[in-house]
């Protein structure tokens, strides 16, 4: 949406959405947007905090570019009407309320209560209604990108995409001079995740099949605190609670983070998630607890209304009782390799947001840098596209999707069974703590699944579940390959076989075999 709003109105824009236009991780983001907004903070401080959290793998020039553009992004959102929280000063004036999250040395996270992503998404969506050049296609799932070489011509320029219309069941052809992937991450590859159901790694998978490199996919961020309750799934408990003083407790009420890091609850997410995982395995308990009940009830209700209401629905009054929590797969730090314009290896193909690998996050994303990255690089991509108006548009005929050789499936049980198996072994073998033996075990299983699903895909008409499973299996394999290659423990990749850091940090870049 940010990219579409920053393109000139003479562009015809087709926005393909798997679900409703706002369905995606942005809508559910609670915490906020990290930005340098007051005199006590600085670009240098935000940059250094990000570099430290990224454990030596952040690209300094990309971090500099991103944080320098943070005030502009926030001002743009305010101009559009995003209603960020404010507070009244002693002199009667008001200013934006900034919170502090793990890894940050200052309060620099601007937010709208605990539903920042929802506020931003709804505002952007409302603004798009006045852009008649943008047409939204709901319930469309990308199948594959169309490139020159795919249709028998020399070159690998991206010409468009095939997409499944979930309403009609037909695959439609979308041709475009420029294609942008804004498809989110791949956390649905894990059994437990904070992400919505749409986060199935589609962009990474279709870009890889088209010839794009991917980078640092071994760095999967597990959010330390997701609600643990049998009647809910994927409900995040924002890090801002810990920023406001919430404590992590064992089942007996004892705090434990001081045993792992002197920053305690405000240590970076990888450290906090490993500490929780360690204690749960040590004690054999199903969860630990996050307690903010020592704060005034009105403070809790006003700052965290979404969490308060949802927990109360489940019988948990967070003003009186601690919240049961577990870690869950949250953010894909790696992705499709891009430059600082969001441009991929394929001419005319861009990737922005969580599906991309810009070099911003390194080995561990710092809290609330993700929404910032989305909008900074969306604006950069829009500007770059507008500079490419002289690019020749491919005029040749692109063949329609051919399903003349396939039939309707009578074995959909294969999809559901393989789906469950994939997500469970990824959780067990490629999770918060890894070993070579676990990774090799996962690789053998994912290769078997790949063979089965490739055969299935070749013989039967496609469906949303089949496309997502096909993509998740591919991305799982790329994650496993990346993890096997990293012979050290750095940031989010922690392996018992290589507990130490290597002297020279390097990115893990995978190249599609036929393009290597």
Image: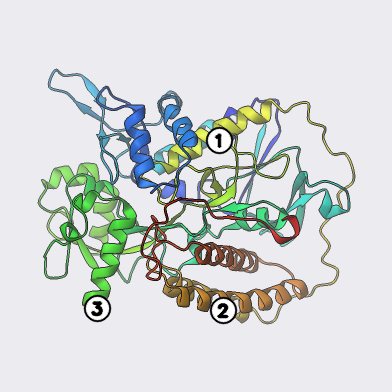
**Separation of residues labelled 3 and 1 (CA atoms):** 44 Å
Q: Residues within 10 Å of mark 1 (few under 14, many from 20)?
A: many
- State the residue position of label 3: 284
Instruction: Tell me if residue 147 comes above or below residue 65 in the rendering.
Output: below
Q: Residues within 10 Å of mark 2 (few under 14, many from 20)?
A: some
- State the residue position of label 1: 378
- How far across and how far down the image is residue 334, in percent? 51, 52
Instruction: Tell me if residue 472 comes above or below residue 247 in the rendering.
Output: below
Q: Nearer the viewer, residue 425 or 286?
A: 425
Instruction: Tell me if residue 399 comes above or below residue 66 in the rendering.
Output: below
- How far across and how far down the image is residue 314, in percent? 26, 64
- How far across and how far down the image is residue 120, in percent? 43, 37
* Residue 312 shown left or right of residue 465 in the figure: left
Q: Residues within 10 Å of mark 3 (few under 14, many from 20)?
A: few
Coloration of the structure image: rainbow
Q: Tell me the tag on residue 445.
A: 2
Instruction: Tell me if residue 119 comes above or below residue 401 in the rendering.
Output: above
């Amino acid at each position: 949406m940010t990219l579409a709003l920053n393109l000139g109105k003479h562009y015809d824009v087709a926005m393909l959405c798997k679900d409703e236009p706002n369905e995606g991780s942005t809508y559910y983001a609670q915490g906020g947007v990290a930005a340098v907004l007051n005199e006590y903070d600085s670009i240098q401080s935000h940059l250094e905090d990000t570099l430290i959290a990224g454990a030596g793998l952040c690209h300094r020039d990309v971090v500099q570019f991103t944080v320098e553009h943070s005030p502009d992004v926030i001002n743009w959102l305010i101009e559009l009407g995003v209603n960020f929280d404010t507070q009244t000063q002693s002199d009667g004036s008001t200013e934006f309320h900034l919170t502090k999250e793990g890894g940050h040395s200052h309060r620099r996270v601007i937010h709208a209560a605990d539903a920042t992503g929802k506020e931003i998404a709804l505002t952007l969506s409302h603004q798009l209604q006045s852009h008649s050049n943008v047409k939204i296609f709901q319930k469309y799932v990308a199948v594959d990108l169309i490139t020159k070489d795919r249709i028998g011509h020399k070159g690998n320029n991206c010409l468009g995409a095939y997409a499944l219309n979930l309403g009609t069941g037909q695959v439609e052809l979308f041709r475009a001079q420029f294609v942008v992937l804004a498809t989110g991450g791949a956390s649905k590859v894990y059994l437990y995740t904070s992400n919505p159901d749409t986060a199935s790694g589609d962009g990474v998978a279709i870009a890889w099949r088209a010839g794009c490199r991917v980078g640092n996919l071994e760095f999967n961020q597990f959010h330390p605190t997701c609600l643990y309750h049998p009647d809910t799934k994927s409900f995040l408990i924002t890090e801002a609670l810990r920023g406001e003083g919430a404590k992590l407790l064992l089942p007996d009420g004892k705090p434990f983070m001081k045993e792992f890091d002197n920053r305690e609850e405000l240590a970076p997410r990888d450290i906090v998630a490993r500490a929780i995982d360690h204690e749960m395995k040590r004690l054999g308990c199903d969860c630990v607890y996050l307690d903010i009940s020592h704060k005034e009830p009105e403070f809790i209700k006003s700052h965290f209304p979404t969490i308060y209401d949802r927990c109360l629905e489940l019988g948990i009054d967070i003003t009186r009782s601690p919240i049961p929590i577990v870690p869950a797969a949250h953010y894909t730090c790696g992705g499709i390799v891009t430059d600082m314009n969001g441009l991929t290896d394929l001419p005319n193909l861009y990737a922005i947001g969580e599906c991309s690998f810009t070099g911003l996050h390194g080995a561990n994303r710092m809290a609330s840098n993700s929404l910032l990255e989305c909008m900074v690089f969306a604006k950069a991509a829009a500007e770059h596209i507008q500079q490419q108006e002289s690019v020749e548009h491919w005029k040749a005929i692109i063949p329609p999707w051919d399903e003349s050789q396939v039939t309707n499936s009578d074995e959909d049980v294969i999809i559901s069974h393989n789906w469950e198996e994939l997500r469970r072994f990824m959780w067990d073998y490629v999770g918060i703590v890894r070993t070579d033996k676990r990774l090799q075990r996962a690789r053998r299983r994912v290769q078997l699944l790949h063979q089965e699903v490739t055969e299935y895909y070749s013989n039967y008409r496609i469906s949303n579940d089949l496309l997502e499973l096909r993509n998740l299996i591919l991305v799982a394999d790329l994650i496993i390959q990346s993890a096997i290659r990293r012979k050290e423990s750095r940031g989010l990749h922690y392996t018992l076989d290589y507990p130490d850091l290597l002297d020279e940090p390097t990115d893990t870049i995978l190249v599609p075999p036929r393009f290597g």
